[in-house]
Image: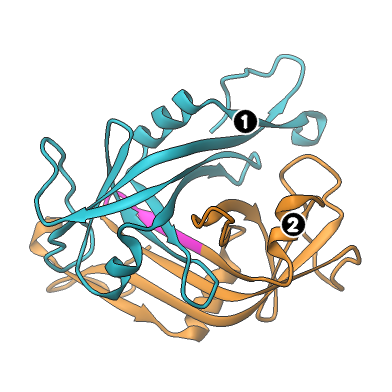
Chain colours: A orange, B cyan
Amino acid sequence: MIDALAVVMEDIPRDECLALLRQLSVGRVAVSGRAGSPFVVPVNYAIDGETIVFRSDGGRRLRDLVDHPVSFEVDLVDPMHRTGWSVLVEGLAFASERPVDGVVVDPWAPGPKSHWVRIVAGSVTGRRIRRVGPGSDPRAYV
Amino acid sequence: MIDALAVVMEDIPRDECLALLRQLSVGRVAVSGRAGSPFVVPVNYAIDGETIVFRSDGGRRLRDLVDHPVSFEVDLVDPMHRTGWSVLVEGLAFASERPVDGVVVDPWAPGPKSHWVRIVAGSVTGRRIRRVGPGSDPRAYV
């Protein structure tokens, strides 16, 4: 029945992108690597206003990240219905060993993770694929 | 009970990374953007040997991608158990309007998607977080 529905790709407004970011807890931080290809790794995160917060150990990866333009991506896909959405935040990353007030981030990964990384959102964009047809519920997407 | 288990982060060997890539159908292509922050977007893909294949429309995004170093990331996370794995392929992207022999990629997104993009894997790395303890099944991870 999926084939009987039209497929649309639509942009997601910034406010809705931020609401979607608040719904998930794992996203992917991406930073341009030295070899040219971006380094992309999942992290568990929290949201503080329009700032993404996660924790990291020190080291080269953190140095590559801080004070640099980075991206943060979240998505949710439904393979059964071949629908989904994604949100991309582009911003600057800052790090501090002082916790962010009022924000709880309990890292999944082992290690002290004593560095609190904040990505302050600049551009926030999102896209959604959904299937529409007679009688289809416009809210019925992932 | 999760707290009673030790958390380990381990590297995933290349062969196993490639096997994991074959298990999923949606990943994220990342390319260093002009503003410095990578552009990251999910695509549905197929695997041809050690090459990732997906389809794209023409345009600026495709031009940013082809003949450039790009990354391709897949992951699977289990928020309940706070475990998961991720695989990162770094490689070069090539595009052609000729389909890749023997590979079926039926794009979720609308549009003709007449360009077949291949990412030829160079570096393939992966990491896994899992929880271990007395009696825990080492295979019992996402």
In this rendering, position of residue A136 left or right of residue A65: left
The magenta span reads A74-80
Amino acid marked by disc 1: Asp
Residue extending furthest toward the right: A98
- Quadrant containing the N terminus of chain A in the rendered view: bottom left
- Could you tell me what secondary structure mostly forms the magenta stretch? strand
Q: Is residue A85 left or right of residue A124?
A: left
Q: At which x and y percent is residue B123?
A: 48, 38
A17 versus A38 height, above or below: below
Give x and y (percent) for residue A20. Answer: 52, 71
Q: Which residue is mark 1?
A: B11
- What is the three-letter code of the residue carrying label 2? Leu
Q: Is residue A42 magenta?
A: no
For disc 2, the marked residue is A62
Chain designation of label 2: A
Which quadrant: the C terminus of chain A? bottom left
Task: Indicate whether B67 appears above or below B140.
Answer: below
Please give the label number shown on residue B32. Answer: none
Residue at left 84%, top 70%?
A100
Picture quadrant where residue B80 is located = top right
